[in-house]
Image (cartoon, rainbow, N blue to C red):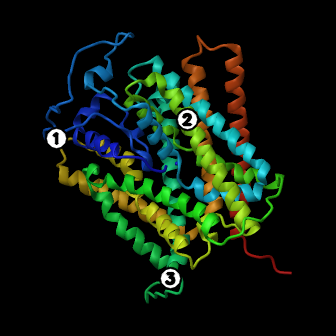
Amino acid sequence: MWPNMLKSLGKNLRLQQNCLQWKNHVDNVESMHSANLDVQWPNCNFCVEESKRCECDHMDIEDTKSAEGGTNVDAELGFKGTGSFTHAVINMVGMLIGLGQLSTPYALEHGGWASSFLLIGVGVMCTYSSHLLGKCLEKNPKIRSYMDIGGQAFGAKGKFLAATFIYMEIFMALVSYTISLHDNLITVFLGTHLKLQLAKLSTSQLLTMIAVLIALPSLWVRDLSSISFLSTGGILMSLVIFVSVISTAIFGGVHINHNIPLLQLHNIPSISGLYIFSYGGHAVFPNLYKAMKDPSKFTKVSIMSFTLVTALYTTIGLMGGKMFGPDVKSQVTLSMPPKQIITKIALWATVLTPMTKYALGFAPFSIQLEHKLPSSMSSRTKMIIRGSVASFLLLIILALALSVPYFEHVLSLTGSLVSVFICLIFPCAFYIKICWAQISKSLLVLNMSIITFGFLLGVIGTISSSKLLVKIFQPPQSA
């Protein structure tokens, strides 16, 4: 759903944005997913304006054909991956780390330390499903995105379904980030009082509105490479949060003496969504695959990346549970000693992280929207339309976040309702359909088992988190 990762984002976004007209050759730009858009593409130094042909120095257009007799898109556009194995691991780890590190301590405490096996198991299955995406990409050189894989498997309906779930995940993830912003601002500005005569809003709500309005102008920037520093900032903020929690355990004077329950089975349905969401990032993996110099190493990249992220989640989860016990909050930063400098650093990092997500989160939607607008429109008109629509959606996200300020329940619902399809169910289903002729019975059983498990986990998680949200809003019954 991030996380963080590197200077290559600027190159990627510059290519996607400045070469907007050339993207007609590849109907996949809409899949460039969110806060995790850091995939290395070839450097684009210059593109002539609007409707003219791209004359970037990396373009070496040849009318080569794919093995299937169609146009080889990679050859036509001159896209040659240059990302190394290490670079790909850094990018993938950055795509994965995000809100998961805030919520894992809460999930492990409420699910019991034995639920860490569920966390690890989900990580293993997500590693396998990312491997399947690579296998689907191998089958057809023209496939470049998650949505293209859906289209290759099930035609227009598959592509539409994949796109719908991707945009839902982006939207709901941004709502969760905004809730996180609201919750941590309360602690950062503890004791601050603001009043607005025309609206009955609390101080925390007003502070959240101000923070979102500060980030709003970034949605109007057309050349996203100019704000690519936001992605690097997101990486640094996640690292700061992790280091702060570890430092609190070592130097913060917090006793690591709480006992984490063995297993609390009744909480598993609700925390399963938190675990699934923590491994979200599959929608961008095809772009990462295409950016690699040697895509045959993609599976090794997935294994390395998910191993590192799972180790991080397990470490911070168990440490948070041991430090704060049953009092651990849904965001571990809210449980840290409020007066310590380490806590203040962690809180500010958590507050700044959502503000780095909005522009990049809306990027796939904005680029696709501009792509659909009539070519007769001027660049200024297109910019006004996309900026206005994105701003309106951001205000809706803000309203939802302030109306439903229950971080763990919204995050769990996102994981169970949306992320489980993108991370587990769809990759297995796409692989079965695309590689049906070569798939063995054992692999078929394995993939069908993952689909079934993912579906069951999604259903019980969605029901559980939905019930918890409904229960919160139900008026108390009078005696």
Mark 3 or mark 2, which is nearer the start of the sequence?
3
Mark number displayed over residue 42: none
Q: Position of residue 232 (x, y in %)?
A: 38, 53
From the image, state whether disc 1 or disc 2 is nearer to you.
Answer: 2
Residue shown at 65% from the left, 52% from the top: 315
Residue shown at 45% from the left, 32% from the top: 286
Disc 2 is placed on an element classified as: helix
Q: Please report contact status of discs 2 and 3: CB closer than 8 Å, yes or no.
A: no
Mark 1 to mark 3: distance in Å? 45 Å
Residue 388 horizontal side relative to residue 170, left or right: left
Q: Nearer the viewer, residue 412 or 90?
A: 90
Give the class, few, some or many, for how many residues have Cα within 10 Å of label 1's Cα (few <14, many ≥20): some
Q: Is residue 203 visible?
A: yes
Q: Please report contact status of discs 1 and 3: CB closer than 8 Å, yes or no.
A: no
Q: Which residue is mark 1?
A: 50
Mark 2 or mark 1, which is nearer the start of the sequence?
1
Mark 1 to mark 2: distance in Å? 41 Å
Mark number displayed over residue 203: 3
Q: Which residue is mark 2?
A: 304
Image height check: is 2 above or below 216? above
